[in-house]
């Protein structure tokens, strides 16, 4: 159950954004609905699996990021890089999306320019995933989410001590 991290607020906000987009660009709204459908299908059918192909997880993240771009059109620069040739590698399902969710939730501002950088690279059989943001959280805002703690628990359950997680 630790991997089911798709935030219901994301779904609500995305549907509201697509609703607004219908009047502006109905073709784009249709495309966004298809992306949302693909995300939900992935969670429904792939979520119960222990692992997925890295390529499938990348497509999931691309669709997620594209849907988030609806909300942050001009103020957020979003960079997502990964190997041009994606190896045939399995990773735990839905392991990376909580980091990307947090980058959007805690790292962007509607008022100030913000940046989100997401990258994947391979070092032998190790996947190196980095997700950074502008950290636009208010000084007095306290974080009470469970996403990162659940990630820590999942990593311990999946890999014992054979992983590195660095959050700063």
Image (spheres, grey):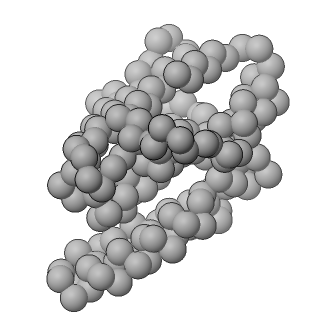
Relative to 12, is 100 above or below?
above
Instruction: Choose between 21 and 39: the one closer to the eye.
Output: 21
Q: Which residue, as the protein is rendered here, is positioned at the far bottom?
A: 23
Relative to 29, is 79 above or below?
above
Relative to 44, is 18 above or below?
below
Q: Quadrant of residue 136?
A: top left
- Residue plotted at (45% across, 43% down): 138
**15 relative position to 163: left or right:** left
Question: Residue 100, can we see it?
Answer: no
- Residue plotted at (53% across, 41% down): 140
Q: Which residue, as the protein is rendered here, is positioned at the far front?
A: 140
Total marks shown come to 0
Instruction: Choose between 104 and 55: the one closer to the eye.
Output: 104
- Residue plotted at (35% across, 74% down): 17
**119 relative position to 70: left or right:** right
**Residue 30 coordinates in the image, percent (x, y):** 30, 80
- Residue plotted at (41% across, 36% down): 135
Relative to 142, is 22 above or below?
below
**Residue 119 coordinates in the image, percent (x, y):** 38, 29
**Residue 165 coordinates in the image, percent (x, y):** 61, 20
């Amino acid at each position: 159950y630790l991997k089911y991290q798709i935030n219901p607020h994301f779904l609500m906000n995305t549907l509201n954004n697509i609703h607004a987009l219908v009047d502006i660009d109905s073709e784009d709204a249709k495309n966004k609905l298809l992306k949302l459908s693909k995300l939900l299908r992935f969670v429904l059918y792939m979520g119960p699996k222990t692992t997925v192909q890295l390529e499938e997880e990348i497509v999931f993240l691309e669709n997620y990021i594209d849907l988030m771009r609806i909300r942050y059109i001009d103020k957020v620069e979003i960079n997502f890089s990964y190997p041009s040739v994606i190896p045939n590698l399995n990773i735990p399902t839905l392991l990376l999306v909580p980091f990307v969710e947090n980058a959007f939730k805690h790292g962007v501002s509607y008022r100030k320019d913000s940046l989100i950088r997401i990258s994947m690279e391979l070092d032998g059989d190790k996947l190196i995933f980095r997700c950074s943001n502008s950290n636009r959280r208010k000084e007095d805002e306290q974080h009470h989410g469970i996403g990162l703690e659940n990630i820590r628990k999942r990593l311990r359950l999946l890999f014992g001590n054979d992983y590195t997680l660095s959050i700063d």
